[in-house]
Amino acid sequence: MEMSNRFKGQEQEIIDLLAAAFAASEGADEGALIRDLSRNLLATTADADIHVFTARETRSLIGAIIFSRLTYEHDGRTVFLLGPVGVATDRQGRGTGQRLLTHGLACLRKSGVDVAVTYGDPKYYSRVGFRPITEEFAQAPFKLKYPKGWLGQSLTDRSLTPLTGPSRCVEAFHRPEYW
């Protein structure tokens, strides 16, 4: 499996993979929602505010993850939000997602990112170091529908401490239906 952080010129392929993965697991409406989110993230987010990691096997895209900047008004740490995450349906359950997430988090660590947060299945994301956090610990940009899915981890050698102030996500994520 080949991992990469280059995504320019592959946007449509990434969008299609993420949309298909969510449609297969969550239904057509969720697939369409993730298609729109992915398209907007890749088209409108400044290069400094996005990290995209892909996994390929024999030239076929088999996984993609996107991190985008999350800013806390009164906190100087660099924070990135993980999402969406997708693995080709015929490759799920083989560790592809875990390896891609581990790779992406390691790259963020090396680039100086302090904290990663995500909003998803605690059982799945705990495998790569995410732990439950509360909205008081780290305010989400919008009220969370499923607060138990709010997760975070320190990417430094220091323990994760509360993130202070209201948060602001990139424009593509600035819609309450994503939260």
Image: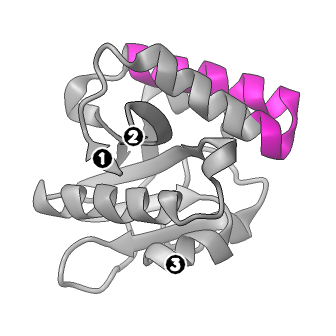
Q: Residue 45: in sight, yes or no?
A: yes
Q: Which residue is mark 1?
A: 2
Q: Which numbered dot is residue 56?
A: 2
Q: Amino acid at mark 3?
A: Arg
Quadrant of residue 84 within the rendered picture = top right
Mark 1 residue type: Glu
Q: Dot 1, crowdedness within 10 Å: few (<14), some or many (≥20)?
A: few
Determine whether the residue tagged by mark 3 lies in a helix, strand or loop: helix
Q: Please give the label number shown on residue 127.
A: 3
Q: Residue at the location (30% across, 47% down)?
A: 2
Nearer the observer, disc 2 or disc 3? 2
Report, in whole angstroms, how far the alpha carbon at label 2 lies from the one at label 3. 22 Å
Q: Is residue 22 left or right of residue 108?
A: right
Q: Is residue 37 magenta?
A: yes
Image location of residue 73, percent across then percent down: 33, 49
Query: Which residue is drawn at the image coordinates 49% and 20% (left, top)?
Result: 13
